[in-house]
Amino acid sequence: MNTPTPAAPAGATATLRPVLRTIRGMATSDGAGVKLTRVIGGPALSEFDPFLLFDEFRSDQAGDYIAGFPDHPHRGFETVTYMLAGRMRHRDNQGNSGLLTAGSVQWMTAGRGIVHSEMPEQENGLMAGFQLWVNLPARDKMTAPRYQDIPPAQVPELHPAPGVTLRLLAGEVGGAAGPVSGIEATQPLYVDVQLEAGAHAVLAVPATHNAFAYVYEGAARIGGAAKATARGELAQLGAGDRFEAQAGAGPARLVVVAGRPLGEPVARYGPFVMNTRDEIMQAFADFQAGRF
C-alpha cells in the first residue's frame, strides 16, 4: 500500500505540489471487452490511497465499447464515472437508472453490495471518459449502497483566470462546491481543468490529501516541472497545498483528483475491495447466495 502524503505543518505558507513521477497507462479491456487505458490499478501504480483504479476509455470505433459492462457486483468501495463524450446507461439492483452523457458524472457507493450494469446507448461515434475507484474505510464498507447521478447542467463551471475553465465535480474551489455530496471519509476533490494556450491555473488542494493530475488533451507543465506532462500521462503529486498547471503553445485539458488517504490495509479481488482475505471470501459467498 502506498504511503500517505504527509500534511504540511500547521501555519505553513502555501506550498506548490511537485510532480513526483509521471506514469503512462497500459492498454487493457474490461467488462465484456471494452478497450481502455488503465493508469492506476496497473503494474506502474497499483494504488494511490484512497484511489484503487483510474481508467480512461476513448474510442470512436463501436467495436471497442459496444459490448459495455453487463451486470456485475461491487462491494467495499465507490465507483466514479465522468463522461466526456457518448451515452452510457446505468442500471442497478437497487432500482436506480441513469443516462450518462457528455459532461455528466455518476458517483456510486457500492457499500455492502450492489449489482449494476453500464451499457452504451449508441452504436457509433465517440465514447470517452474516465472511471475512478475510491476506497471506503473499514467502518463504511458495509454501509447501504448509494447512487448520485449528476447531469451536466448541475456541474459548476468556473473561470478563475484568463483562459482557464474549471468544471467542479466534487470538493470546493474558491468558495464554490461540486454537486457530489456526502463523501465524508475521503473528502474528494475532482476538477476538470481546461486551459487555452499559455493559460495558467492555480488550485488549492488540501495538504492532507493525496493528489494526481491526468492530461487527456495537449500537454501542461505541472507543479513547476521543467518538462510538460503529455497527453495520456498521469502526474503523481507530492506534498503541498497548491496545484499549478500551465499550457504551452496549444490548449490543454486535464483532470485533477485528490482524496484523504485512509491508511488501512487493502484486500482486493476482482470487484470486491475489503480489509482482509476473509472479508473477500465472505463477499463472494454473499454474492453467490444472492445477498447483495
Image (cartoon, helix red, strand yellow):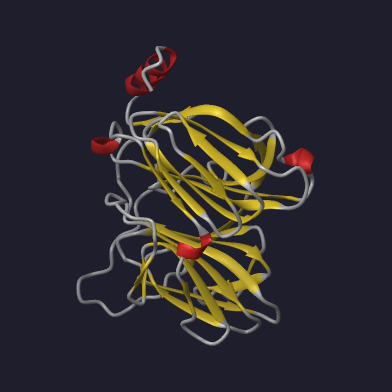
- Residue 262 appears left or right of 273: left
Q: Is residue 9 above or below residue 211?
A: below
Q: Is residue 147 left or right of residue 43?
A: left
Q: Is residue 276 above or below residue 53?
A: above
Instruction: Give the image location of residue 51, x and y in percent.
Output: 43, 47
Quadrant containing the N terminus in the rendered view: top left
Residue drawn at x 35%, y 36% as measured from the top left? 145
Quadrant (top left, top right, bottom left, bottom right) of the C terminus: top left
Residue that lies at the very extreme toward the left in this rendered image? 10
Q: Is residue 26 left or right of residue 134?
A: right
- Indicate the quadrant where residue 93 lies: top left
Q: Nearer the viewer, residue 200 or 10?
A: 200
255 displayed left or right of 286 = right
Identify the residue at horizontal 52%, vertical 77% (top origin).
224
Residue 242, picture quadrant:
bottom left
Question: Compared to 119, does 49 lie above or below?
Answer: below
Do we see residue 66 in this rendering?
yes
Q: Residue sitting at 67 percent across and 76 percent down?
A: 251
Residue 25 position in % (x across, y down): 63, 49
Q: How many marks overall?
A: 0
**Residue 185 versus residue 93: which sits nearer the camera?**
93
Q: Position of residue 225 (x, y in %)?
A: 55, 74
Residue lying furthest top in this view? 289
Residue at coordinates 39% horizontally, 36% vertically from top-left?
Answer: 110
Is residue 42 in sight in this rendering? no
Residue 27: percent from left, percent from top = 69, 43
